[in-house]
Amino acid sequence: MYSQGQRDRDRDSEKRKGRDDRDRDRDRDRDRERDRDRDERRYRDREDRKRRFSSSDRLGYDFYVPYNVQFTKSRINTAQLEFERSKVIEELLQYYLSSSKEFLKVTPPMDAFNRWLIEQYSIPLTPDQETLYDNDKYDPILPHVVALQDSEVMQREILKNIPAPTYVSWGHRNKPSQHTLKIFEEYLAKTEPVIDAFKADHPDLSLEKDPMLFGLFESCTKAISQINQKLRESLQNKVTPEIIAELLKDVQESTPFFINHYRPIVNEWYKLFSAKAIELVQRLNKPLPESNEVVKVRKDYETYRISYDSDSLTLLVAHYDKLRELYKIHSSEVDPRLDYFEERLYCLLRRYESCFGKQGAGFQAAAPETVFKFLSSHFGVCHETFASPLNCYYSRYNSAFPDTDGFFGSKGSFFDFSPIAGSFQLGTPNVEEVMNKAAERVEHLLENSKGPMSFIMFVPDWDNPPAQFLLTYGNSKYLKKNFLISGNDYCYIRGDQQVPSNSTHYFVAPFSSRVFILQNEEGYKKWPVTDSSVQSLKDAFAASKALKQSY
């Protein structure tokens, strides 16, 4: 028989065993819960990586290139205000179209309005504008309407299209047809009444009385006569690129007379347009009524629909993923739960649709990812100086709209950007004034650099006569290399790549581009330019055509 002491010891042992069993069960349950949480995290991370990498592979971007640049806080925005801004831009556009038809009796080119908008974003902020909304003639969507009262951009573009537009696309220049000749037939039809009216108003015009005006008029009538003759000869023959080139040259010789004739009228009209722009900006600075509207986001298979009030914008899923990742990289500290992501996404999309959605997408085209991959691996490039959240390859870049784009990684306008070192890619919109200012800015930054600095520029080869930006880059003491990429030998990415379209993601660039590489001495030592690296960059451009075929 057990003694009492033995029974007590057995009882204590049973209690300890029960406690140990309960502890083991609790530890096992805790381990299972930890493993389940770990597996869920791994699954979420795997799905997030899968989503991220599939989008990055499809669109061609890399937000994890090491950053070597050494420098504005984003301005607060609301969907309601951005919606109002879109109405203002639309109203200004309609005023531009209707007033120019009424005042100038011409159909104005859309390009002129788009180029005028882009020029707004190439002017550095003045000290009074840096205080932002203290100035009632300032708004981020139209920041320099006062400064542009003397702008030549819009006036020049309109004068180029008077008395009729003669733009021939690169495709029609290379493969013209009888239909291409209609452009010049219309030009002749519009010039005749202008010339007849001028003769009636100047019956005594002679070389002795007004040599300059007489010379312009003589050159014009001679060029018009040549156009007429070439058109008659071409009606029965095959139209060749050489014929189109000769006709465009004749048009160019007739242009100075029409510019001289119409410039005073265009100047008067532009004063009215500038006054309207200032009036609309002042309207934006007035308080808005309270609104309960919110941004709504809905996914439809391969697109997202982002809506506010009566406004609705469509975005491809891959671009939604890209913008969400950019926002998380740059705004997670101030918005860790992404509470404001959808409203800021709407403001961003609405801004670009307002400013570049009406035939302005060409100004947002971007170099292909084959080129950017090479630039980052061989030249340390990690920053684009003219980009947007929609078309950027790197996670940091300069763009036109710091107030909307700052949440997505923008460092603001290139013209307000003052790095002291770093490696950069530069591809400006094809607006001559902007490209000239950008060339001057590059020179200034290299002159004031404090460490290794490198710029690689892709610009159109406007060499007949040479554009000022070509001369600035070509004569720079920092120039290490310049070479040509021939038209039709490479692709660019469409400027409206983010919206559903029947078009491909890429387009074959019909124009030649010139590549300039400018570096200070430290930059040249760190990222040397060799014959081999230049050839590899040319190969990277050429490889973009394979992307178009496989996309």
Image (spheres, helix red, strand yellow):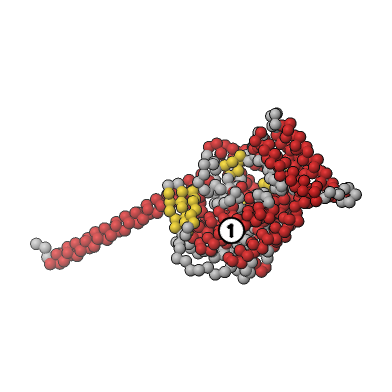
- The residue that appears at 75% across and 54% down in the rendered structure is 263
Examine the rendering and report whether any part of residue 456 can be seen.
no
Q: Residue at x 62, y 57 (%)?
A: 95
Q: Is residue 316 left or right of residue 93?
A: left
| Picture layout, residue 473 above or below residue 535 | below
The amino acid on which the numbered mark 1 sits, given as a three-letter code, is: Glu
Indicate whether 132 appears above or below 68. Answer: below
Count the labels in the image. 1
- Left or right: residue 391 versus residue 471 is left
Local SS, label 1: helix
Image point 57% across, 51% down: which residue?
Answer: 357
Residue 400 location in percent, x, y? 61, 57
x and y percent of residue 436 in the render? 72, 53
Q: Nearer the viewer, residue 301 or 57?
A: 301
Per the image, the residue denoted by label 1 is 91
Whether residue 323 is visible here, answered yes or no, is yes
